Image (cartoon, rainbow, N blue to C red):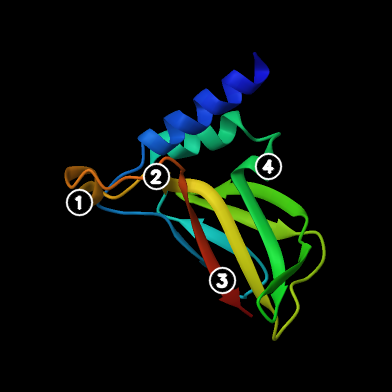
Amino acid sequence: MNKFKIFASIFLMLASCKADKSPQIGFSSDSTKIVVAHLGEAELYQIRQLKEKENLIMQVYQSKEDSLEKEIKGKISISGDSLVFTPNQPLEKGSAYMVNTLIGANFGKTEDILKSDVGYKVKTLQKELLR
């Protein structure tokens, strides 16, 4: 039953994504944190509901030469319309970080849906950041 609640929460979060302003992943202005900006109220609500399930919201990996080396642990907080990931250890300068999140994820874009070209898997929002 608990898995169903988590799945339902994630589904609601995915269904509530706005088409006009999709979430954007980047570093904070001082490059010490990772920020997912431009979240809607429904997405922020779902994040608050999943707060104790941080690994379902966002995963951050340090990557080297096309391989994921280690998962970066940290805390998630909300600031305005943004989700902020603060790592337990400082992010290393010159390192690449792969960020995966279900926030803003979908089964396909509007044009894909209209063309009946949608997949059966959720397309997560992911971005590689270089510090």
Image disc number at residue 106: 2
Q: Quadrant of the N terminus?
A: top right
Residue 113 is drawn in which quadrant? Answer: top left
Quadrant where the C terminus sits is bottom right
What kind of element bears circle 4?
Answer: helix
Mark 3–mark 2 distance (CA, rounded to whole Å)? 19 Å
Decide which of 12, 110 is in the foreground and name it. 110
Q: Is residue 32 above or below residue 53?
A: below
Q: Amino acid at mark 3?
A: Glu
Spatial separation of the CA atoms under disc 1 and disc 4: 31 Å
Name the residue at 55% across, 27% down: 7
Q: Quarter-wise, where is residue 27 in the image?
A: bottom right
Q: What is the crowding at mark 4: few (fewer than 14 residues within 10 Å), some, or many (at least 20)?
A: some
Name the residue nearer the viewer: 86 or 25.
Answer: 25
Q: Earlier in the sequence, mark 1 or mark 2?
A: 2
Q: Residue 79 placed where, x, y %? A: 54, 50
Task: Quickly name the residue at label 4.
Answer: 54
Confirm or deny contact between disc 4 and disc 3 (CB under 8 A). no
Q: Nearer the viewer, residue 27 or 125?
A: 125
Tag 2: amino acid? Asn
